[in-house]
Amino acid sequence: MAKFKTHMGWGVFVGVALVVAGLIYSIISGIESAIWIFSAVLLGSFLPDLDLDGGVPFQILFGLLGAGFAGFIFFNFYQEGERSLKILILIPALTFVAVRFIAGYIFEKFTHHRGMFHSIPAAILFGLLTIWFSHLFKIIEGKELVIGASVAIGYIGHLILDEIYSSTNLKGYSLLPKQSLGSALKFYSDSRLSTLLFYCLIFALALTLPETREFF
Ligand SMILES: [Zn+2]
């Protein structure tokens, strides 16, 4: 299994390659789209290791989610005219704790490393989720599909790198394949429940999103 730093380096490489290809084939234009695509690939390239309990990807994502929700709640209270410092500080702080630690704890309990998060359907699911989030927060309008695809590409890049690392030992010589070979690029996991859940979510999102509905 490749380390976080290796995945980031690889993510930067894939991100730059994708931006260059996008510019050559005129899929994207302008610095803003280039930054979005690059960031989306980078995000995708660390997402699979979310299932690594207490790992850097887990800490980054749940930290960001906690801070995001806390900020959102603070902003809403403030806009509605709330000026009590107790409420303005306490409730966002509790929200942060609830997301970062409680939701994070539940997430860690229900995932195990290289389970369903290291699979092709997970890459598709996170691509679709990105499109859904982009619509929800009305960011990068008209480019949702490209950004979603960039996350999925970064995600698959991570899985491929894990596979490459599985077939080589620590010094880089390709000797006997390790046990984890083939455990990253798969279509299902040992858990039937999580496999079913992932496919149901893909199906539900594909039916809801305008991009995929159009495609069908
Ligand atoms: Zn991995």
Image (tube, helix red, strand yellow):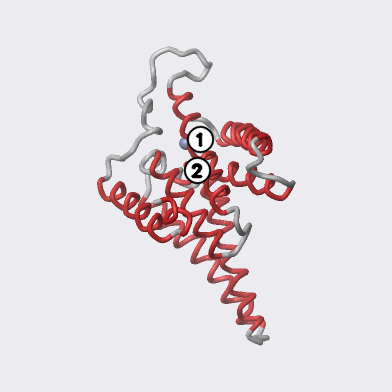
Label 1 environment density (alpha carbons within 10 Å; few <14, some 14–19, many ≥20):
many
The response on whether ligand 1 sits within 8 Å of label 1 is: yes
Residue 14 at x, y percent in the picture? 60, 33
Relative to 11, does residue 100 appear above or below in the rendering? Answer: below
Relative to 167, does residue 79 appear above or below in the rendering? Answer: below
Label 1 sits on what residue type?
His
The response on whether ligand 1 sits within 8 Å of label 2 is: no
Query: Does the CB distance between marks 1 and 2 fall below 8 Å?
Result: no
> Mark 2 highlights which residue?
152
Q: Which mark, by number, is residue 82?
A: none
Q: In terms of image quadrants, where is residue 203?
A: bottom left
Residue drawn at point x = 38 percent, y = 58 percent: 207
- Residue nearer the viewer, 101 or 40: 40
Residue 193 at x, y percent in the picture? 27, 50
Label 2 environment density (alpha carbons within 10 Å; few <14, some 14–19, many ≥20):
many
- Residue nearer the viewer, 78 or 15: 15
Residue that sits furthest to the left in the current view: 192
Is residue 113 found left or right of 147 in the rendered image? left
Residue 73 at x, y percent in the picture? 58, 74
Relative to 140, does residue 24 appear above or below in the rendering? Answer: above
- Residue nearer the viewer, 101 or 192: 192
Residue drawn at point x = 51 percent, y = 30 percent: 2
Q: Earlier in the sequence, mark 1 or mark 2?
A: 2
Residue 34 at x, y percent in the picture? 69, 44
Instruction: Report helix, strand or loop for mark 2.
Output: helix
Q: Distance between the residues labelled 1 and 2?
A: 10 Å
Residue drawn at point x = 51 percent, y = 49 percent: 58
Residue drawn at point x = 53 percent, y = 59 percent: 133
Instruction: Report helix, strand or loop for mark 1.
Output: helix
Label 2 sits on what residue type?
Ala
> Mark 1 highlights which residue?
158
Residue that sits furthest to the right in the current view: 31
